[in-house]
Image (spheres, rainbow, N blue to C red):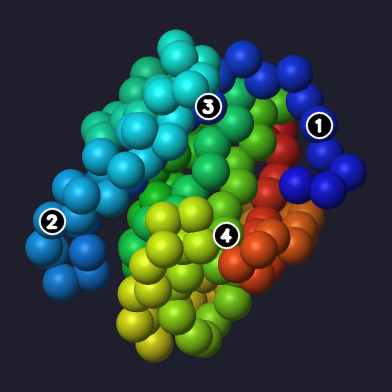
Amino acid sequence: MSGFYAPFNKLYSIDPWRNIDGSSNLWLAKKCRNKLKQYGNRSIIIETTSMDESIDYLYIDGDHSYKATMDDMVSWLPKIKIGGCMSGHDYRNTGKAISAAYGYVVNNNNCKVKLAVDRFISKHKYELNIFKSITGRGWWFIKK
């Protein structure tokens, strides 16, 4: 995230490891765990919920439909500390979900991340920030 820095101690990665059709994506979970292993106990992968206000920085990369994106943000907001950051990628409403890091493309013409993020930001009156990444544009805000 260009121009943004905070002294976060832990990275929590959250993913249900399921494809849009409900099939398992465990091969991707294994690949993710192997990539994050180098960070030791500073990187925690969560497949379930966590205690409220316990997370400094949360990066969402899940199902890109409107409902799933909104559900992720609503479900995880209480878990983030005041002054913590929620972030995600694929800030758009069309196209494919791409993961350059893991080398796969999901044909997802139902991508509505931008719509969900914009409505969530408006409802909660947060300041939306946009950043560029190798797979497109991402978003982030600080919880008040």
Could you say whether the residue bearing mark 4 is in a helix, strand or loop? strand
The type of residue carrying mark 1 is Tyr
- What separation in Å lies between label 4 and label 3 (alpha carbons)? 16 Å
Looking at the image, do the residues carrying marks 1 and 2 touch, with CB atoms under 8 Å apart?
no
- Nearest the viewer among 9 and 104 is 104
Residue ID at (76%, 58%): 131
Report whether residue 68 is seen. Answer: yes
Whichever of callouts 3 and 2 sits on the residue coming sooner in the sequence is: 3
- Indicate which disc, 1 or 3, sits on the residue closer to the N terminus: 1
Which residue corresponds to mark 2?
24
Q: Quadrant of residue 63?
A: bottom left
Does 102 sit left or right of 131 as displayed? left
Direction from residue 126 to residue 20 in the image, left or right = left
CA gap, disc 2 and disc 4: 21 Å
Q: Position of residue 142 (x, y in %)?
A: 71, 38
- Helix, strand or loop at label 2? It is loop
Q: Which residue is mark 4?
A: 89
Residue 82 showing in the rendered view: no
Residue 62 is labelled as none
The C terminus is located in which quarter? top right
Q: CA distance from mark 1 to mark 2?
A: 34 Å
The picture quadrant where one finds residue 105 is bottom left
The residue nearer to you, when weighing 84 against 27, is 27
> What amino acid is labelled 3 in the image?
Leu
> Residue, x 59% and y 76% (percent of image)?
92
Task: Write down the residue under mark 1.
Answer: 5
Left or right of 91: which side holds 63?
A: left
Q: Is residue 92 left or right of residue 99?
A: right
- Distance between mark 1 and mark 3 Cα atoms: 14 Å
Between residue 123 and residue 98, name the one nearer to us: 98
Which residue is pictured at 41% across the width and 63% down the height? 103
The residue to which callout 3 is attached is 11
